[in-house]
Image: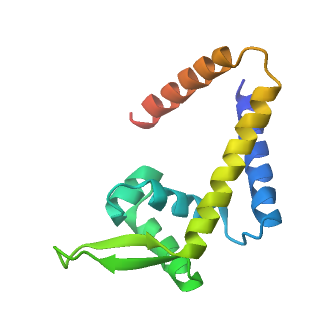
Amino acid sequence: MNELLVDIFNQILIIEERYHRVHGIKLSMTEVHTLEGISKSETKMMSDVAAHLRITQGTLTTTINRLTHKGYVYREQDTRDRRIFRLVLTEKGEEVVDIHNQFHEEMIDRLLLHLDDSDDLIASVNQINTFFKELYDI
């Protein structure tokens, strides 16, 4: 089972990287997932994005600095509280997130084409996900 899970995880990463390269994305998977984390964040604050990605704020700062330098993200000062800065995706950053989301949609669509009963798979994957979330939160 371990070998199967590790193999699936590695296969997805390889396919995902290849898909991004074919679509002109020249960012690391860490950078792409950081952009995704910003897009999914409700507050767009560093602490929220870091928590969502399950990384430290220091690690996030390093990645945000690189993405800012490359023109994918910028920091915007909050209008009400000048101590707060929010992360904002540039148009380039939004394009990367769109391509990344497209990859995931296509991957799931293709996977479901090959299954007779997707409900069983979804239930099983949900159980696995719950297990790993509980394990992570220990």
Image coordinates for residue 71, horizontal then vertical, percent: 56, 82
Q: Which residue corresponds to the image point at 58% horizontal and 18% vertical from the top-left?
A: 123
Q: Which residue corresponds to the image point at 45% horizontal and 37% vertical from the top-left?
A: 136
Res 29 → quadrant:
bottom right
Looking at the rendered image, the quarter that the C terminus falls into is top left
Q: How many marks?
A: 0
Image coordinates for residue 73, horizontal then vertical, percent: 49, 75
Q: Does 109 appear above or below 27? A: above
**In the drawing, does residue 133 fall left or right of residue 17?**
left
Image coordinates for residue 48, horizontal then vertical, percent: 34, 57
- Is residue 34 among the parts visible in the rendering? yes
Q: Which residue corresponds to the image point at 41% horizontal and 69% vertical from the top-left?
A: 58
**In the drawing, does residue 58 fall left or right of residue 34?**
left
**In the drawing, does residue 87 fall left or right of residue 67?**
left
- Is residue 54 among the parts visible in the rendering? no
Res 94 → quadrant:
bottom right
Image coordinates for residue 88, horizontal then vertical, percent: 43, 71
Q: Which residue corresponds to the image point at 71% horizontal and 50% vertical from the top-left?
A: 103
Question: What colouring method underlies this structural image?
Answer: rainbow
